[in-house]
Image (cartoon, coloured by chain):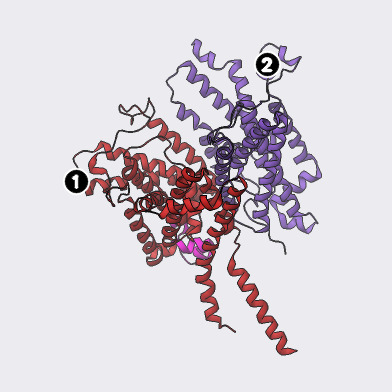
Amino acid sequence: MRTEKSTHLLRDYGGKLLDPLFAIVFALIIGAVIIGLLGYNVLEAYAALFSGAFGSIRSISQTLLAATPLMFTAMSFALAYRCGLFNLGAEGQFYLGAIMGAWVGFAIPGLPHGLHLLVVILAGAAGGMLVGLIPALLKITRGVHEVIICIMMNYISENITNYLVSTKGPLLQGSTLPATPKVLESAKMLELIPGTRLTGGFIVAIVFAIAMYVFLWKTRTGYKIRAVGYNRYAAETGGIRTVRYTVLAMLLAGALAGIGGAVEIVGVHGRFYANFSPGYGFEGVAVSMLGGNHPFGIILSAVLFGALKTGAMAMQIQAGTNAELVKILQALVIFFLAGKWSIMKIIERRHARSNEKIREGGQA
Amino acid sequence: MDSILSIFSAGTFAATFRMATPLVFGGIGSMYSERSGILNLGIEGTMLMGAFSAAMISLLTGNPWLGVLGAMVTGGFIGLLHAFMCIKFKAAQTVIGVGINLMAMGIPSLILQAYWGSPGSTPPVPPIKNISIPLIADIPILGEIIGNQNPLTYIGLVIAFVSHYFLFKTPMGLRIRAVGEHPRAADTVGVNVFALQYFSVILCGVLAGIGGAYLSLCQVSMFVKGMTAGRGFMAMAAMIFGKWKPLGVLGAALLFGFSDALQMSIQSAGWPIPTDILLSTPYILTIIVLAGFVGKAVGPKQVGKPYIKQ
């Protein structure tokens, strides 16, 4: 019979690693069933998926490129979640951060490269924080649940950015498309792998993931945020000013999503286009959950989803299946994890049953 | 001065009802779900899937009313899925809603590409045309506004009034409300909490499905990718603005519909008001209401909390 300690270790780490693994396998299996039912050749499709994601340097760079915005929105969700908040406003925060980043990217000439990038990131953070401020304030002053406010803010933010680059908007400045002018060279991210579109944005995301880990688990402020997330009332009783840390968590979450938007603009697009996000904010929820709402898990999870998206495009070209299949896979991952269909529970139940039998056998 | 009055024409008011219809269905559906204590963010996705299945079935059978039926079944199934995950597995209701929305974003394109090779939209499908109510349509101004609308619009109005009666004047409506406010008390008195929650969420899905069908069969006659464009969330906003009461939801839906119609009139009248700001009005109004600046906006107490039987 196993000892107590090894059982706990197995449960903790096994659960954290096995559950996401089973979630993605489950999603892939159901996905295979769906496209099989639609008449596609499953083997051909999935082969294209995997080779499209990892088959060449170019694929890998596309994968990492696709993973970058997901990392930011997922970290945004995760940070708020660790404080007991549901930040469903990452989409709006992303947009406002993106347009702020684009604005300082094209409007401020003459800065050295490194400084300009820093300013872009700060602008992105500010934009995201602005959007996140409203749900935060309403929650602490009037006790309003943040979920609906966040969703409303998504649409308001999108409309604001659309207005800013519309024909009547101030940021259009002569472009023919609904977009800002291109950002200056000094604001652009450097290429990471020559010949590909992968830029330093991915590195920035990793840096923030490490920073988030250190902040949440190795600082006092981070500890307090997590304490509020575990049990608001216990934290309050223990002397933590929950109001302060709730607002902080929401602002930081907004900042992360906003930085993601700014990075996506200067790293990939070079200018802000209206409606350029295909739903990164909501996808971030799935990515975060698969990553156990932990920055390091999020890195892996985002790379996985980036791979799925890249591979899905190859799958579309080769097997004809629509790339939106990835959204269905994301949904399945969410269902599996949110339903807590934990493999560990099944193993535990079997373990408990076998222990009982041994005990009963001993008495008989 | 002429142009100010022109935007408040009978045409604008008629358009109000047209714009409001999906919000009425979605809003009242949402209301049923939340009245029983289950938060349903998946309304947006359910509406989209309703629009899609209505268009598909209308196209395949040639009968748009079968399309509406299909939308109801689809919506009901999605409601069942949501209820199952939230009630049986006590999953976080917010997250399941997000999952449903993601799923609904993906399924139409996948199926469209498989059958038509083009993932953006269906071909034109048989629509449900507007009808004219004989006597009412002849009344001078009122007739123009309300006498010539789509059957689904009229059905929506009827459902709003019927829901008011059902929720507040029948025993079952009382039980649903009790489950949303104080499930343990209801359980103690012998009310089947879970059964009522399943019923409410499935009903929510059915109504949202019809709301979606309106979009693809009545407003235009085809399905276009992403055609709900946030209307599901706006319907939730109407529910909140309407203080979770059917007639309030109807009023809120009409208000939002009016804002939409107004925005179009202003655009065609050539006024320099940025439309994007006007488009944000429903969302800003909802935030204001939720913040409690227009009276209390307190939903059913148990919304979002899974009931644990003991």
Say which amino acid is labelled 1: Pro
Q: In this picture, is B272 found above or below B2?
A: below
Residue for point 32% across, 28% down = A175
| Circle 2 residues within 10 Å: few <14, some 14–19, many ≥20 | some
Q: What hue does chain A carry in this figure?
A: red
Q: Position of residue A203 (x, y in %)?
A: 32, 55
Q: Which residues are magenta?
A: A225-249
Separation of marks 2 and 1 at Cα, in angstroms: 66 Å
Q: Is B88 positioned to the left or the right of A138 in the image?
A: right
Q: Is residue B37 visible?
A: no
- Taking the magenta stretch, the answer to whether it contains residue A248 is yes
| The C terminus of chain B: image quadrant | bottom right
Q: In this picture, is A317 found above or below A297?
A: above
Say which amino acid is labelled 2: Leu
Q: Position of residue B124 (x, y in %)?
A: 60, 26
- Taking the magenta stretch, the answer to whether it contains residue B41 is no
Return the residue nearer the eye: A28 or A70: A28
Which residue in the protein does label 2 denote?
B142
Q: Position of residue B182 (x, y in %)?
A: 70, 54
Indicate the chain on which mark 1 is placed: A
Residue for point 49% across, 53% down = A47
Which residue in the protein does label 1 denote?
A112
Q: Secondary structure at mark 2?
A: helix
